[in-house]
Image (cartoon, helix red, strand yellow):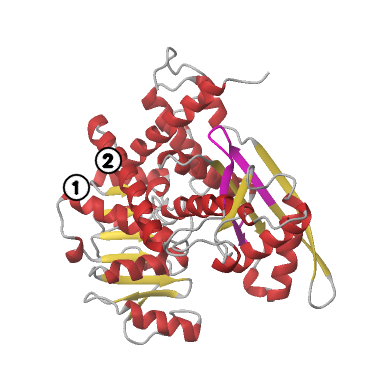
Amino acid sequence: METKTTVKSASVVKPLERAESHEDNAWHQAMLQLDRAALKMKLEPFVLERLRHCKRILTVSVPVKMDDGQVKVFEGYRIQHNMDRGPAKGGIRYHPLVCLDEVKALSFWMTMKCAVVNLPYGGAKGGIICDPKKMSKGEIERMTRRYTAEISLIIGPEKDIPAPDVNTNEQIMAWMMDTYSMTVGYSCPGVVTGKPIEVGGSLGRREATGRGVFYVTRELAAREGFDLRKAPVVIQGFGNVGSNAAKIFSDHGCKVIGISDVGGGLYDPKGLDISDIFHYREKNETIAGYAKAEHVDVDAFLELPCDILIPAAMENQLTKANAPKIKAKYVIEGANGPTSGEADRIFNERGIIVVPDILANAGGVTVSYFEWVQDMQSYFWSEKEINARLQEIIIGAFTEVFDLAKKEKVDMRLAAFMVGIRRLGKAASIRGMYP
């Protein structure tokens, strides 16, 4: 974006001026990334100030009658970071460590992600501080419905469209859709994405994030000139993203040598039998105890020898503490915010290429966009058509970011932020400011 103003505003803070003790604060890390891109781009202060603040933050109390008859009150959030390019979009997570700064950061990354892949969305995120593993299905349903009712004044198919995230799934999205529909008085499938097929979900949505991770890795291999089928892959996390990525890589002849979940990791330098591990997890609900591979401690798992490392679990997994020990040549971020700013710096110094989250895991929001379009039109596409469109968008975004990184001699994260911020800046400037 062409500007007449250089960055002299006090709002721009150089990354090195910030205290390293904030490495585990997601919002702080997000703002470090924004500052770095702003300095490189000589970003107009007006645009920077817009991106430094969330448009809307809603905190709600969620009273739930538990199975034992007692009432427990949970705290929930829905945050809309930016809506200059369209309605807000972002997931809902249920986790004991959900906090305001985390949800703010995730909403910011969603804004950037949608801009990088050029979807007509802004960014949002939501969450409830809870431990769903200690709750019954009935308690989770009642909590979900009450939370949906509490945030219903700011969500909607033309305002803000939630989706699944950590510890939420298709069933929870169906409860949200039903609750919102009861509120407005008619069936409204477009209010959420990631729903079951039977109530307006999209084919290919469940696998979309993992499939997008594969597409960017395959493109990276083509650009870097290595054979992906001969490059050992380690995947942290065996939830929706990690498990589907493992299956898709394996189906394409790639050698997945390590996978993990909260119980620990599995490792086999000859390659894991992903299909067999899927069958084991279906019976045991975890991969812990799987006998046909070496077991690796969670803390040591990320340091396994490999060519490609895919962190697909939670934020802040790669830090200044373990970044010097990472043996991978390429890091493909399947999770949101898995790499701290200090780890990024170390990876750059070591020549490790990082494909950032706002590009690498954008397959999920891309097919969520497809689902929303299908719901709004009441016209649904084939899975073949969906995957083809997903591939076109992801490869196009990867090419744009990779080429800019080479042209500007910057890392891919900075290039991705530059692509996204340019689009956001143009939207903000064209729309202007009311009043």
Q: Judge left or right: residue 261 versus residue 84.
A: left
Residue 84 location, quadrant: top right
Q: Is residue 419 above or below residue 308?
A: above
Q: Amino acid at mark 1?
A: Arg
Taking depth in this image into account, of 23 and 362 the one nearest to the observer is 362
Q: Magenta residues?
A: 77-98
The residue at 31%/55% (across/down) is: 215
Q: Position of residue 192 (x, y in %)?
A: 61, 55
Q: Judge left or right: residue 37 versus residue 142.
A: left
Label drawn at residue 223: 1
The residue at 30%/38% (across/down) is: 400
Mark 1 touches mark 2? (CB < 8 Å): yes
Q: Amino acid at mark 2?
A: Phe
Q: Position of residue 157 (x, y in %)?
A: 63, 47
Position of the C terminus, as image quadrant, is top right
| SS category of the residue bearing label 2 | helix
Majority SS type along the magenta span: strand
- Within 10 Å of disc 1 (Cα), the crowding (few <14, some 14-19, many 20+) is few
Taking depth in this image into account, of 351 and 406 the one nearest to the observer is 406
Residue 302 shows in this picture: yes
Taking depth in this image into account, of 386 and 239 the one nearest to the observer is 386
Number of marks: 2
Magenta-drawn stretch contains 93:
yes
Residue 11 shows in this picture: no
Q: Is residue 43 above or below residue 58?
A: above
Q: Is residue 48 above or below residue 201?
A: above
Q: Is residue 400 above or below residue 328?
A: above
Residue at numbered disc 2 = 402
Q: Position of residue 142 (x, y in %)?
A: 75, 67
- Within 10 Å of disc 2 (Cα), the crowding (few <14, some 14-19, many 20+) is many
